[in-house]
Amino acid sequence: MQRKYLAKIFVTLRPSVLDPAGVAVQTSLRQMGHETVEQVRIGKYIELTTIAPDEAKARQDLNDMCEQMLANTVIENYRFDLIEVESQTGVF
């Protein structure tokens, strides 16, 4: 039996990495009168669906995808939420 999972992946810069886009947004927000904004960090949000026999395999596949392509692990952190959306027997 194969299962379909929805992954919601969040990629953010490591805290020690300068975020010029975040600084630009913060500056603009303050200029617009939003003086309470202390810090802005810009990241990426990715959704994908994947098929795996179980949650453990889906998580391992997602870790591999993040490590190999979706995140630059030298300067970025990532985390993901995984939701099973469908179970089916047979081939997808």
Image (cartoon, helix red, strand yellow):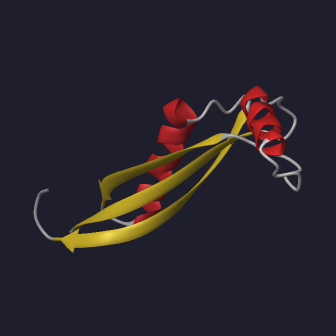
* 49 on left or right of 24: left
Res. 16 visible in picture: yes
Whole-percent x, y for residue 19 in the image: 78, 31
Assign the N terminus to one quadrant of the image: bottom left
Q: Nearer the viewer, residue 35 or 60?
A: 35
Q: Of all residues shown, which one is farthest toward the left?
A: 90
Residue drawn at the location 42% of the way across and 69% of the way down: 83
**Viewed as shown, does residue 55 lie left or right of 28?**
left
Above or below: residue 57 compared with residue 21: below
Residue 29 horizontal/vertical position (percent) = 77, 44
Residue for point 47% across, 39% down: 65
Please state, as top left, top right, bottom left or bottom right, where the C terminus lies in the image. bottom left
Q: Residue at x 83, y 29 (%)?
A: 18
Q: Is residue 40 visible?
A: no
Residue at left 50%, top 31%? Answer: 69
Residue 2 position (above or below residue 43): below
